[in-house]
Image (tube, helix red, strand yellow):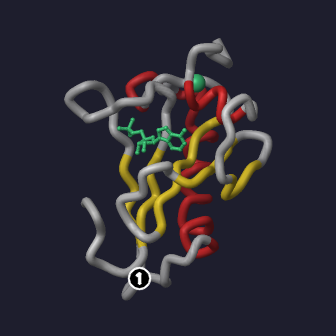
Amino acid sequence: MTHDPNCLFCKIVHGTISSKKVYEDALVYAFHDIHPWAPVHFLLVPKVHIPSLAHLGPEHAALMGHMMTLAPKLALQEGCRPYPDGGFRIVSNTGAEGGQEVHHLHVHVMGGPRPWLRG
Ligand code: AMP
Ligand code: ZN
């Protein structure tokens, strides 16, 4: 299944639910987290519905490589200061004990001056 009609982030990717867009290309969509923990806090998701990191196979290697190489560029674009004094944190909650609430694979990209609300 490439799209789950009941999935919140599929609805965001397809524009059924509005979001504050950070970036979009053919493979991924990035948008501001609605409850930011840090001065910079956005989510980067594949456009295709993949429930979590636990669902990845070898066929997803290029997609995940794209997301991981894109994230630092978007972090700078959104106001994170450069490494090493600045930087950012990447988190991907996976499963109930991993704290995952939305079951569409996503990475949190957080950064900016501390203290942060959480994390
Ligand atoms: P988790 O699945 O635990 O990684 O958390 C999902 C994240 O999605 C949380 O940080 C929420 O604040 C965020 N979130 C939930 N609904 C929306 C929305 N409509 N727009 C943007 N972010 C959202
Ligand atoms: Zn989805």
Q: Is residue 59 above or below residue 74?
A: above
Q: How many marks?
A: 1
Callout 1: CB less than 8 Å from ligand 1: no
The image quadrant where one finds the C terminus is bottom left
89 vs 15, nearest the viewer: 15
The location of residue 44, given as percent across then percent down, is: 56, 48
Residue 87 x %, y %:
41, 76
- Rendered residue at 72%/29% (across/down): 16
Q: Position of residue 7 (x, y in %)?
A: 56, 21
Residue 55 vertical placement versus 73 (above, below): above
Tell me residue 75's x, y (percent).
54, 68
- View extreme (left): residue: 97
94 is higher (above) or lower (below) than 22: above
Q: Who's the residue at 42% across and 51% down the image? A: 35
The answer to whether residue 15 is left or right of residue 81 is: right
Label 1: few (<14), some (14–19) or many (≥20) C-alpha neighbours in 10 Å: few
Please report the residue visible at 50 percent of the width from the left and 51 percent of the height from the top: 33
Q: For the residue labelled by badge 1, is the local secondary structure a helix, a strand or a loop?
A: loop
Disc 1 residue type? Gly
Picture quadrant of ligand 2: top right
Residue at (65% x, 45% y) in the render: 19
> Relative to residue 84, is residue 71 drawn left or right?
right
Q: Which residue is farthest right?
A: 26
Name the image quarter holding the N terminus.
top right
Where is mark 1, residue-wise? Answer: 86
